[in-house]
């Protein structure tokens, strides 16, 4: 059975210079994974375990950060459903979204304590994929 004490975080871009961190409350994240992505309990459990393999306070991979845009309130139907599936989030209307692409793992995790605001870290060249 899934340990519901595990707290998952998502990043929501609030404006051009501030990133906020929010815990997923209740079973909202479970609904996203099982509903939008069609994952079963075993797949969700495997995903949670893989996400925890390095523990907290590490940088384990990189993504390219693209353009940020405001999802219009008028977006409905299939277009909204496709966007929610891609973002792995629901209720995207009137939210700022940032395109992320090119995900890749570092050769080894790097210990780094982050914060609630934007922060930087030096990654040794030997860790780049």
Image (tube, helix red, strand yellow):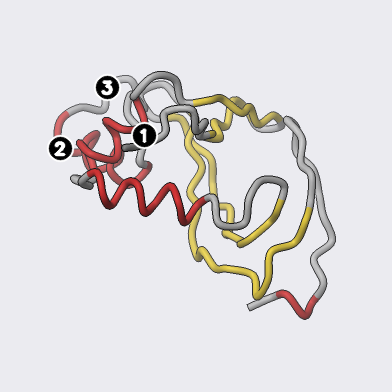
Q: Are marks 1 and 2 in contact (CB under 8 Å)?
A: no
> Does 8 sit left or right of 123 as displayed?
left
Spatial CA span between label 1 and label 2: 15 Å
Q: Answer few, some or many: residues within 10 Å of disc 2's Cα (few below 14, many 20 plus, some between 14 and 19).
A: few
Asked if residue 128 lies left or right of residue 64, the reply is: right
Separation of marks 2 and 3 at Cα, in angstroms = 12 Å
Q: Position of residue 100 (x, y in %)?
A: 50, 52
Q: Which residue is mark 2?
A: 78
Sequence-wise first label, 3 or 1: 3
Residue toward you, 78 or 112: 112
Q: Find the residue positioned furthest to the front.
A: 1
Q: In the rendered structure, which disc, 1 or 2, sits on the residue that comes first in sequence?
A: 2
Residue at disc 3, secondary structure:
loop
Residue depicted at 32% across the width and 46% down the height: 44
* x, y percent for residue 47: 39, 52
Q: Based on the displayed image, in which of its 4 quarters is residue 20 positioned?
A: top right
Q: Is residue 30 above or below residue 59?
A: above
Q: Quadrant of residue 71?
A: top left
Q: Position of residue 51 (x, y in %)?
A: 50, 52
Q: CA distance from mark 3 to mark 1?
A: 17 Å
Foreground disc of the pair 3, 1:
1
Mark 3 packing: few (<14 Cα in 10 Å), some, or many (20+)?
few
At 63% from the left and 60% from the top, the residue drawn is 60
* Corner quadrant of residue 3: top left
Question: On the picture, is 39 further left or further right than 47?
Answer: left
Tell me the element at label 1: loop
| Foreground disc of the pair 2, 3 | 2
- Residue at image mark 3: 74
Instruction: Tell me the tag on residue 89.
Output: 1
Q: Nearer the viewer, mark 1 or mark 2?
A: 1
Depth check: give the residue in front, 105 or 51.
51
């Amino acid at each position: 059975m899934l340990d519901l004490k595990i707290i998952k975080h998502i990043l929501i871009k609030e404006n051009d210079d501030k990133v906020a961190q929010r815990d997923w409350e209740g079973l909202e994240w479970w609904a996203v994974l099982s509903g939008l992505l069609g994952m079963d309990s075993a797949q969700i459990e495997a995903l949670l375990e893989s996400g925890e393999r390095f523990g907290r306070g590490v940088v384990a991979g990189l993504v390219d950060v693209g353009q940020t845009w405001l999802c219009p309130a008028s977006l409905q139907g299939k277009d909204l459903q496709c966007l929610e599936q891609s973002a792995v989030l629901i209720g995207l209307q009137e939210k700022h979204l940032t395109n992320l692409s090119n995900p890749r793992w570092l050769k080894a995790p790097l210990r780094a304590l982050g914060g609630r605001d934007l922060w930087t870290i030096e990654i040794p060249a030997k860790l780049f994929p």
